[in-house]
């Protein structure tokens, strides 16, 4: 396990806000458009900010774009909150971005699960070992979107030196509970499926959750976490119920509107961060756009 400070550990058990990647009209990254998003998130006390997550369209970015977005987030946050940087794709790219993360001064890295169709469990273990070596002391949070490698192998991943925790993004809370029971108590387990799944995973031992909503309405994400920490599950479910349409739109088209929904909502807020890149859907359909607008108006966001 990684040695992490008490402050970072506390942040990891809170809300990991996954920042969008803004693009300009020529499809170039435009980090300056993140300014109001970061300021809103910090003002709302979002615990930790994440560059190059899935809401950041990590898999649509070129390596140099991912590195620049990481550097921009570190510069803009300026020490006011911990910063995680997502690394992944080929093992060489993941290691290179891990080394760049350390140089840029991020607080920890989030390792995307390798999407290779021929990823073997023991190959994934080797992948994480190599990324951990490249990170050279930076704590690793593993981003697990598929639990097919089995609980035993997941626990082995958490035993790799440098691994501090797991963002569990598979809708299997009972398997999560088993993994938590089987792993060392120092490992931090986080709901990686955002607000809607947070109560189920919190109930079995996960702490905090990842969120794309923080780009649009960070105060609501914070309120949900506060309700869960107070044991007020009914209140948490009420708060989540008011954003269910937001998350439902994001889940459509095989989740292809996940980031599209966030960027469409940002446009409605007057914080245009450009379109999503293919193969994500863009723009929302007329029906989806009207539903998004109605939902944001109903809760007073716009």
Image: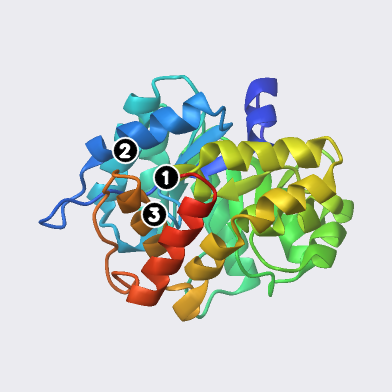
Residue 109 appears in the figure:
no
Which secondary structure, mark 3? Answer: helix
Q: Which residue is mark 2?
A: 34
Q: Which mark is residue 19?
A: 1
Side of 68 relative to 84 (left or right)? left
Q: CA distance from mark 2 to mark 3?
A: 14 Å
The reply to whether dot 2 and dot 1 touch (C-beta < 8 Å) is: yes
The residue located at (31%, 63%) in the rendering is 60
Please provide percent x and percent y for residue 74: 37, 29
Residue at x 31%, y 48% (from the top left corner): 66
Find numbered disc 2 in the image and state the secondary structure of the residue it sits on: helix
Q: Give coordinates of residue 38: x percent, y percent.
A: 40, 32
Q: Which residue is mark 3?
A: 265
Q: Locate residue 63, reporting x and y percent.
A: 28, 53
Q: CA distance from mark 2 to mark 1?
A: 8 Å
Local crowd size for mark 2, using a 10 Å CA cut-off: few (<14), some (14–19), many (≥20): many
Left or right position of 151 against 62: right
Residue at the image position 68 percent from the left and 30 percent from the top: 9
Instruction: Examine the image and state in which quarter residue 44 appears.
Output: top right
- On residue 176, which mark appears? none
Residue 60 in view of the camera: yes
Image quadrant containing the N terminus: top right
Mark 3 neighbour density, 10 Å: few (under 14) some (14–19) many (20 or more):
many
* Element marked by disc 1: loop
How far apart in space, not on screen, are marks 1 and 3 (Cα)?
14 Å
């Amino acid at each position: 396990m990684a040695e992490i400070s008490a402050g970072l550990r506390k942040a990891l058990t809170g809300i990991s806000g996954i920042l969008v990647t803004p693009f300009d009209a020529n499809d170039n990254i435009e980090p300056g458009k993140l300014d109001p998003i970061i300021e809103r998130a910090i003002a709302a006390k979002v615990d930790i900010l994440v560059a190059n997550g899935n809401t950041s369209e990590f898999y649509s970015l070129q390596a140099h774009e991912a590195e620049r977005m990481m550097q921009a987030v570190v510069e803009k946050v300026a020490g006011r909150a911990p910063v995680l940087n997502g690394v992944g794709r080929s093992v060489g790219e993941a290691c290179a971005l891990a080394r760049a993360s350390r140089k840029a001064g991020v607080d920890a890295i989030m390792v995307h699960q390798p999407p290779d169709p021929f990823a073997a469990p023991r190959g994934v273990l080797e992948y994480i070992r190599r990324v951990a070596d490249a990170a050279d002391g930076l704590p690793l949070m593993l981003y697990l979107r598929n639990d097919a490698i089995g609980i035993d192998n997941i626990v082995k991943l958490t035993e790799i030196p440098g691994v501090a925790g797991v963002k569990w993004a598979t809708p299997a809370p009972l398997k999560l509970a088993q993994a938590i029971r089987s792993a060392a108590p120092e490992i931090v387990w986080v709901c990686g499926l955002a607000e809607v799944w947070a109560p189920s995973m919190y109930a079995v031992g996960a702490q905090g959750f990842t969120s794309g909503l923080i780009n649009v309405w960070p105060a609501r994400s914070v309120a949900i976490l506060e309700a869960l920490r107070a044991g007020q599950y009914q209140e948490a479910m009420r708060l989540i119920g008011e954003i269910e349409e937001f998350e439902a739109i994001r889940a459509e088209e095989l989740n292809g509107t996940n980031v599209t929904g966030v960027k469409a909502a940002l446009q409605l807020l007057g914080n245009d961060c450009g379109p999503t890149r293919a193969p994500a859907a863009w723009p929302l359909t007329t029906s989806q756009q009207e539903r998004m607008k109605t939902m944001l108006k109903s809760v007073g966001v716009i």
